[in-house]
Amino acid sequence: DLGKVYELPNLGGVPEVIVDGGTGALADAGDAEGLAAAAAAMLDDAERWTSLSTAARARACDCFGLGSAVDLYEACYRR
């Protein structure tokens, strides 16, 4: 969902979507305590939650929205 803040493991393509500290939180793979701490920190700080969720929505729209996809497809076809 756009505008949601996620705490996810730093695996695969996740860092491409989530900017640690900017649009959500990343923890090392298998670090359940780190993920839990990140989630607790978000729940305890409504202002930070709001800031991260706003940034997450903006990044999702800018990087992964329809306009971005169309631009990438056009660039591929022009090559």
Image: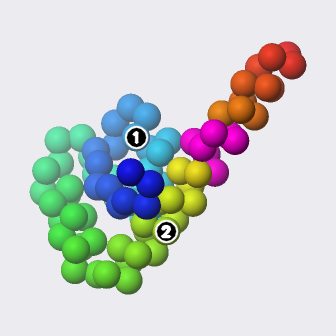
The label on residue 14 is 1
Question: Which kind of residue does numbered mark 1 sit on?
Answer: Val
Single out the residue that lies furthest toward the right. Answer: 78
Q: Residue at x 43, y 34 (%)?
A: 13
**Taking 17 as reference, is 54 above or below it?**
below
Q: Is residue 37 left or right of residue 46?
A: left
Sequence-first disc among 1 and 2: 1
Q: Quarter of the image holding residue 69?
A: top right
Q: Main secondary structure of the magenta part?
A: helix
**Label 2 amino acid?**
Thr
Residue name at image x 22 percent, y 64 percent: 39
- The answer to whether mark 1 and mark 2 are in CB contact below 8 A is no
Up/down of 73 relative to 45, above or below: above
Residue denoted by label 2: 54
Q: Position of residue 44 (x, y in %)?
A: 22, 80
Front residue (pair 63, 36): 63
Examine the structure image and report whether residue 19 is included in the region drawn in magenta. Answer: no
- Residue 15 image position (x, y, % from top left): 44, 44
Task: In the rendered view, tell whether residue 30 sits above or below residue 12.
Answer: below
37 on left or right of 66: left
The residue that appears at 15% across and 60% down in the rendered structure is 36
Q: Secondary structure at mark 1?
A: helix
Q: Position of residue 63 (x, y in %)?
A: 61, 45
Residues shaded magenta: 62-68
Q: Which mark, residue 49? A: none
Q: Quadrant of residue 38?
A: bottom left
Confirm whether the magenta stretch covers residue 66.
Answer: yes
